[in-house]
Image (tube, rainbow, N blue to C red):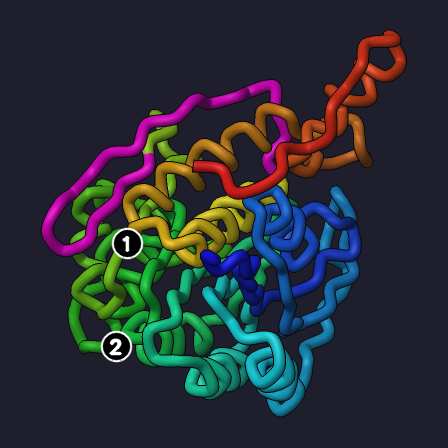
Amino acid sequence: MPDARVPAVLSIAGSDSGGGAGIQADLKAFARCGVHGMTAITALTAQNTVAVSGIHPVPSEFIVAQVRAVAEDIGVDAVKIGMLGTAETVRAVREALDLLAPATPVVLDPVMVAESGAVLLDEPARAAIVEELLPRVTVVTPNLPEARVLAQTAGEARGGVAPGGEARGGVAPGGDDAEDLARRLRRLGPAVVVVTGGHREAATDVFFDGDALELIPGERYADGAAHGSGCTHSSALAAHLALGRPPLEAARAAKRIAAEAVRDGIRGLGAGAGPVDVFSLTRRHRGARGGVPTSGAAAGPLA
């Protein structure tokens, strides 16, 4: 009989007490894609839709212990890395990755700024990501400002002139189009770069694997809610790699799932930016109130 084992995907990321992003968004995205989600929490945050009022880093040794516990018993078919915060945490995650099989796909979402504007990655941590993690990961999924910061950080580390100007508030301004940035980041070590389109005029992702540069178009939903969209995208991509999809197919699926989650986002939840919704909860509740039969979230993997 064929192997019916459900793939297990590990999120190494921070916790969002408001449930919109971070570990909470990752677990919802994993379930949406039909894989089993596991967690290694890097930091606890006190946050809601308006602000991040506190961050409590998890000790490095305990981050490693969480990864070891699930790897030794359950196994890890893919990894998504999110909020890291400090260089010490980056190094702990790099150590933890050595506990996994060398071929395990790793997706890095270089989270730098929360939807509320709080800076979640300090400057030493940016440098550590460039030196410690980019050479190790399978896919890195920065948005356009994050891609500029990583390219700038790499330039500074090599003693060159930083492209794109000085960083302000955790992101760098300036030109440097997404296609050029994807090529530059690919030279830093990841097998694949996906520069996401959420911060571009056109909501188009740029995929580059060293050979082909592909554009992945998508819809922009101005009336949606986007808190957690980056987490959802990278988690869906990791889930599809665990399901055996090639990177480009996984990136296309992640784009679609994240866009639909923004479209169906819960705008009325809290006073600030509402969270994405991978389960179309608002639509289902509207249907229930109107007496229209509703179905549960789609089961199984989504192509």
Q: Is residue 21 left or right of residue 236?
A: right
Q: Is residue 183 left or right of residue 94?
A: left
Q: Secondary structure at mark 2?
A: helix
Is residue 268 visible in the rendered structure shown here? Answer: yes
Q: Toward the viewer: 144 or 231?
A: 231
Q: Is residue 217 magenta?
A: yes
Residue 298, image x, y percentages: 62, 33
Query: Does the magenta stretch mainly form a helix, a strand or a loop?
Result: loop
Residue 180, image x, y percentages: 17, 47
Q: Toward the viewer: 102 or 121?
A: 102
Q: Residue at x 66, y 59 (%)?
A: 23
Distance CA(mark 1)–CA(mark 2): 20 Å
Q: Toward the viewer: 120 or 165?
A: 120
Rendered image quadrant of residue 100: bottom left
Q: Residue at x 43, y 22 (%)?
A: 219
Q: Is residue 53 left or right of residue 224?
A: right
Q: Which mark is residue 1?
A: none
Q: Residue at x 39, y 58 (%)?
A: 167
Q: Amino acid at mark 2?
A: Ala
198, above or below 172, in the image: above
Q: Residue at x 64, y 66 (%)?
A: 38
Residue 197, image x, y percentages: 37, 36
- Which residues, given as a range, are shown in magenta? 205-226
Q: Which mark is residue 157?
A: 2
Q: To which residue does mark 1 refer?
A: 193
Q: Quadrant of the C terminus?
A: top left
Q: Secondary structure at mark 1?
A: strand
Q: Is residue 145 left or right of residue 239?
A: left
Q: Amino acid at mark 1?
A: Val
